[in-house]
Amino acid sequence: MCSSDLMIVTRIERDAMVGMAVAVRKNLPIRRYADAAGPTEVSLFWRHPYTKRRYKCRLDKLIPETHTIFDLKTTRDCQSYKFGGQSYALGYHIKMAIQFCGYRELIGAEPQMRIGALDSKAPHESAVYRLTKDVILQGIEELDLLVAKLDECEKSGKWPA
């Protein structure tokens, strides 16, 4: 019998998870955010002030005292010249822009945005990056284009592949 709160993993998967958890604990910059006072897995719900479209997002870690949002990602390579390209291709800048806008709308303050990158393969190197305002603004701009396309599809009933 299998319970919905249990997950079966292989020994290799377990060893990888344990290795990554140990690596996070050893990385002082990541540990600084992980151990900071504040809730994890925080859900935000709000309406966009102009479009009135509903939004939601989930924050990995919120540090209210410093208005910081911290997101932890696994990656093939945490080095900035590789992780930067991977994170852009995966749309992390848009995801973080949504989090930024939601926090700003609900709290009234602009949060500091941090992203931790953890190599998924041993020896599990890691790094913490600060998302600059330029990156957040680019994410907002691309989000606006995606929402405009969504509006167009909803109105026309035509959904491109």
Image (cartoon, grey):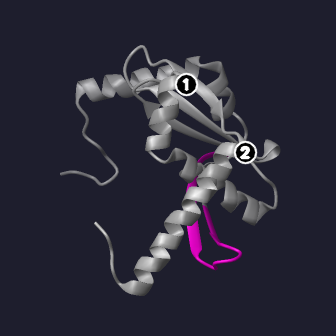
Residue beneath the point at 67% across and 33% down: 33
Crowding near the residue tagged with mark 1, few <14, some 14–19, many ≥20 C-alpha atoms within 10 Å:
some
Residue behind mark 2: 133
Q: Eyeballing the image, is 106 above or below 65?
A: below
Residue beneath the point at 55% across and 52% down: 94
Residue beneath the point at 29% across and 43% down: 7
Q: Nearer the viewer, residue 76 or 139?
A: 139
Residue behind mark 1: 80
Q: Position of residue 71 (x, y in %)?
A: 58, 41
Residue beneath the point at 40% across and 24% down: 18
Q: Position of residue 134 (x, y in %)?
A: 69, 44
The stretch of residues the image draws in magenta is 44-62
Q: Is residue 157 magenta?
A: no
Q: Quadrant of residue 128?
A: top right
Q: Please, which residue is most extreme toward the top here?
A: 123
Q: Quadrant of the C terminus?
A: bottom left
Q: Position of residue 36 (x, y in %)?
A: 71, 35
**Nearer-N-terminus badge (1/2):** 1
The dot on residue 72 is none
Residue flagged by tag 1: what amino acid is it? Answer: Ser
What secondary structure is marked by label 1? helix
Most frequent secondary structure within the magenta stretch: strand
Q: Eyeballing the image, is 36 above or below 119?
A: below
What secondary structure is marked by label 2? helix
Residue flagged by tag 2: what amino acid is it? Answer: Lys
Q: Nearer the viewer, residue 110 or 137?
A: 137
Q: Is residue 42 visible?
A: no
Is residue 105 shown left or right of residue 41? right
The residues bearing labels 1 and 2 have C-alpha atoms spaced at a distance of 17 Å
Q: Is residue 52 visible?
A: yes
Q: Quadrant of residue 135?
A: top right
